[in-house]
Image (cartoon, coloured by chain):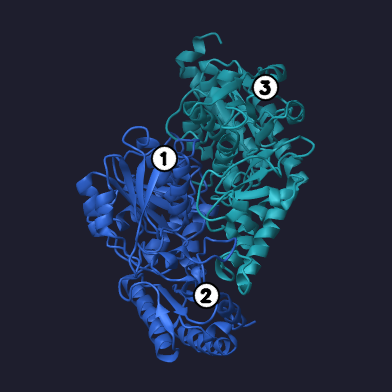
Chain colours: A blue, B cyan
Amino acid sequence: MGRNIYMDNSAATRLDEKVLEAMTPWFFNNYAVATSEFGYSIGIEAKEALAEARLILAQKLGASSEEFIFTSGSTESSNLALKGVAKALGGKKGKHMIISKIEDYPVLHSAKELEREGFTIDYLDVDQYGFVDLQQLRKLIGDETILVSIQHGNQEIGTVQDLKSIGEICREKGVLFHTDATHTFTRMPINVDELNLDLVTVSSNTIHGPKGIGGLYVRKNTEIRKIMDGGFQEFDLRPGIENIPGAMGFAKAVQLVTDEENERLQTLRDRIIELVFDRIPDVTLNGHPEKRTPQNANITFHHVEGESITLHMDMYGISVSTGSACFSRSLEASHVIAAIGGDHERAHGSIRFTLGRYNTGEDIDETVDAIEKIVNQLRLISPLSNKEV
Amino acid sequence: MGRNIYMDNSAATRLDEKVLEAMTPWFFNNYAVATSEFGYSIGIEAKEALAEARLILAQKLGASSEEFIFTSGSTESSNLALKGVAKALGGKKGKHMIISKIEDYPVLHSAKELEREGFTIDYLDVDQYGFVDLQQLRKLIGDETILVSIQHGNQEIGTVQDLKSIGEICREKGVLFHTDATHTFTRMPINVDELNLDLVTVSSNTIHGPKGIGGLYVRKNTEIRKIMDGGFQEFDLRPGIENIPGAMGFAKAVQLVTDEENERLQTLRDRIIELVFDRIPDVTLNGHPEKRTPQNANITFHHVEGESITLHMDMYGISVSTGSACFSRSLEASHVIAAIGGDHERAHGSIRFTLGRYNTGEDIDETVDAIEKIVNQLRLISPLSNKEV
């Protein structure tokens, strides 16, 4: 097989060489445990490096250094946000949380677990584009509500929520506000003060940074407790020997994302959508046409199965997705497309294109050429193609 | 400053170049999400690589592949072992656990957290070497006991417990047995069947593997529930996009440890102890002389403060430790040395030497030369040196 075109979720997981360069000295030259202990100069140097990485990450969110903690990834970050607030406030203020119906699994399944532990969770409806219902949110917040968790950019359809309005409601009602910004961090501006955010999940391996590290912004004085126990690292919110190479790589990955790159990805994204709509009939764009993450396109090709498309695309060496990347067990109809009012067929025929730094205009052309051929062929033989949609 | 001699906990955290080589293809060539989804050949290749890494790790413990799960590190592994069993059995069999008094923070503080949640924890006494009291263990196991968690090699004094006898008692009493093998994995043989182990915490960054990854052995059919929620990775016990570069690096790190290396470390360890005892009066070995991890020496230099020694050693470019490496907030008297009957002075004058692949005989000679000079000087000026010990 020749080269592969990565246009599934892994497109953005390729490490940038410059990230590895930033990590390397901390593999081989200074690998000390980060500490401020008196009389341990290599440890102090390591601690200063960690502080520098932390500052870069905090600043990207408009936050202070001591409000950013490193975790093992965005899954852990969202678990810490929901369960950490539940531990701190569940026995005090109340046991009610509100999330959206289209959250990714870390938030959705943490909420389900809290439900099993006696919490009440409300799941906000979304409209045809995936936007949560702000009136419903306002109505559902009560005296016992301790947290609202609504994602920034959707993992499947790319829709970007109006965090500013949500943040204003939460602030007005005195409720903590968490957002899962796994798919928007660095790709779109996030300022925790402008958006009234108290907790923000961010990810490294979605922006060409290393796997095994992630972060959580925690506003000063937020009532939250750690969910893992051990040492007293990360302001006593996340134990374990600090992953300094990971932190340095994560910070470098953040620095490497530029406005120009985000504009370029958005241009590529719009080109996929435009070419597909020009050349292939019976397609539906999933998510909002403009208010979407720059790296995401999601299109339903009616009368065909997404699995058939991915299989045939794979033969061309092109990887695209049909379901949530976190869902590693089976292909079920997407809960996101169901929530925006799509039927089974719309979910199953949906293809997600995710773009990263290494995708080119040529990739887009090859991908659209391939998918046009494949969809035409599949529709000729598909039993679904006789059905009305 | 010239070269540094790492002889504190970070000695074994230096990445081996061969480990980075094993990780690199998974940074740049195949960075796909691991999946067995039909029609995603790069994902299948990634999944096979992960399975290969998993098998190497499982086999090192005499286990099967599906019994080994990747975590973010040994802290998470021990949290999962204790709290995961608590979740599965706490509402069913009982709320009682037994650990030793000298466990490292992940086990110790997870147990303390479970206590706050209504569990009863018994803390086994240890003798002057740090060995747990087997009679006490046998007596304390009751109908409501769900887990015994006793470490393999101690993090500070290196003492290696008699896991075989402990495992026999647990098996006889029908109680799950977890061990924290962070400091022994690959350095000493561990066979989960011979030792009757149900859960084993293992670490990568203590054997020149990457940070941000660790593992937990979970015997087939063990009643345990996950502690973080999200996707269904790692046999539905640990969610989050798989850290394939980390897993490949961890597996390579395991393969690079040889019996010859372990013997070499033990020889270096014994040389430190022998030279110190030959040349410096008023010293005490902490831990057992033979039944200790090959990479650990821990010696109390009476009449001096450990902090003063580390400070002066640092001026020679040599790093050694006085407290638990996980304890990043302050220097408190070690709970381990207190448990083996040492007083405050014995804890404060204790110095831990940790050895790794890159330490040489020359390091040992330089270190002992330096510490001899330092201890002599400090004793001349120390107010403690007039006290009887």
Please, which residue is most extreme toward the top here?
A: B388
| Residue B177 left/right relative to A89 | right
Disc 2: which chain? Answer: A
Of tags 3 and 1, the one toward the viewer is 3
Q: CA distance from mark 3 to mark 2?
A: 54 Å
Circle 2 residue: A320
Please, which residue is most extreme toward the left here?
A: A172
Of residue B384 and residue B231, the one placed in the foreground of this image is B231
Circle 1 residue: A237
Q: Residue A259: name its quadrant.
A: bottom left
Q: Is residue B121 above or below residue A41?
A: above
Total labels: the figure holds 3
Q: Is residue B373 at least partly visible in the picture? A: yes
Q: Identity of the amino acid at label 2? A: Val
Circle 3 residue: B141
Q: Position of residue A204 (x, y in %)?
A: 44, 59
Disc 1: which chain? Answer: A
The residue at 59%/21% (across/down) is B122
Q: Identity of the amino acid at label 3? A: Ile
Label 3 sits on a secondary structure element that is: loop
Label 2 sits on a secondary structure element that is: loop
Please, which residue is most extreme toward the right here?
A: B194
